[in-house]
Image (tube, grey):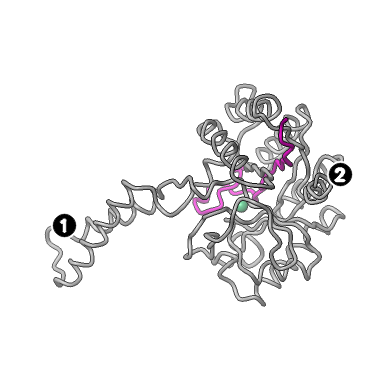
Amino acid sequence: MTKTVPFVLSMDCERVNPGKPFYPAGPRTAKESARNIAAFLDIARETGFPVTLFLTPEAAALHAGYLKRLDPAMVEFGLHLHPRTFAHGISESLGLLEASMQESLLREATEAVEKALNRRPVSFRAGFYSANADTFRILKSLGYRYSSTTVPGRYKPAYGIDWRHIGAEPAEIGGIWECPLSASPTRRLPDVAAATRTLLGGMTAFLPGRRRPAASLLRSAIALGRAVRAAIRPGPDIDPASLQIEHRDHRLRVAISREILSMTATPVLVCTTHNDVDFAHPRSPHAAALRRYLHWLRHRAGITPAPVLLRDARKLMSERT
Ligand SMILES: [Zn+2]
C-alpha cells in the first residue's frame, strides 16, 4: 500500500531586480518574470499540480492582470516579504525586527497584495525564511492561517533564522499552521560561502607587511583553523538551493524527499523555486528537471502524492486521519 502525501508546489516571486547584486536576486526584467511564472504554471497544469505562489507586493502589482485571470482552484496567492526590497528598504531580515516594525511592514504588504489582486492572502512565506515568534502572532492577527517559512535545522542567527528545533512535520506556531520546507534535519551541507569568507579573512592577517599584536594574530589563527575545519566538515546549515527545483541537484532532492517520507509520521512535501529560474526556454534544463521531478512523484516514489494548495493541505490531512 502506498502512502498518500500532501504535496505543495510553490514559487517565490521576487521583485524585478535589474542587475543589483544583493539578495534576493529576482528576475532581471518584467518580461522574464512573467515568462517564468507562466511557464512554471503551464508545467504544473500539464501534470495536474496546483501551485502556491508566494508573491512580493511588487510582483503581485506587476502581474496583477495575468494573475487575476488564473483559476483560483489551481493557484493560490500567498505573501512573500523581504523587508530589504519592500517599501522603505530596511536592510534587516524580518526575524530580527522589532514586533511593531514587523507589524507595520506585514500589514502594509498584505494590503498591497490584496489591493492588487482583490484577494486577501491567508498563506505566508518570509523572505530568506527569516521569522520569529512575533511574526507568527502578527500573521494571525492579520488574518493569516498558513505559512511555509521554516526550514528544519536551518540556523543563521545573523539573519534572524533559528529553526534548529523545527522538525519535518507541520506544526501549529502562534495560531498559524506552519508547513516546513522539505529539508532534512539530518542532511547538512557545508556553508561554503561563509567558510571561504572566514578563510580569506584569516589568511590576510598573515600577509607580510601587516603588523598586528600577538593576541590579534592568535585570534586570526583560531578563526583560520575553524574555517578550514568548517570547509572540510559539514557545517550547521542546510543549503536551500539544493531543495529547489533546479536541475543541478535533482538526485539530492529525490533522496531528501524519500528520507522525509520515512522519518515523519505525517509528512507534507513542500518544494519551492523562484521566478528568476528559466522554465520557459524550449531546452530549459529547469523545465526538464521539474517535469522529471513531478513525474517521479507520480510514478516512482512508492507514494501517492496529493497535490494541494498550501491553504488546503491541513484540511486534506485531517480528512485522511
Ligand atoms: Zn525571497
Would you identify the image quadrant in which residue 309 lies? top right
Residue 104 part of the magenta-drawn span: no
Magenta stretch? 1-28
In-image side of 164 versus 304 (left or right):
left
Residue that appears at 59% across and 44% down: 263
Residue 310 position within the rendered picture, expressed as x and y whole percent measured from the top left = 76, 48
Q: Earlier in the sequence, mark 1 or mark 2?
A: 2
Q: Which of 35 and 135 lies nearest the eye of the viewer?
A: 135
Would you identify the image quadrant in which residue 297 lies? top right
Image disc number at residue 198? none
Q: Which of 92 and 303 lies nearest the eye of the viewer?
A: 303
Q: Which residue is mark 1?
A: 207
Q: Is residue 297 visible?
A: yes
Residue 16 part of the magenta-drawn span: yes
Q: Is residue 84 above or below residue 254?
A: below
Residue that appears at 78% across and 62% down: 144
Q: Is mark 1 within 8 Å of ligand 1?
A: no
Q: Is residue 280 visible?
A: no
Q: Is residue 289 above or below residue 162?
A: above
Residue 71 position within the rendered picture, expressed as x and y whole percent measured from the top left = 87, 40
Mark 1 surroundings within 10 Å by alpha-carbon count, few (fewer than 14), some (14 through 19), many (20 or more): few
Q: CA distance from mark 1 to mark 2?
A: 61 Å
Residue 58 position within the rendered picture, expressed as x and y whole percent measured from the top left = 71, 54
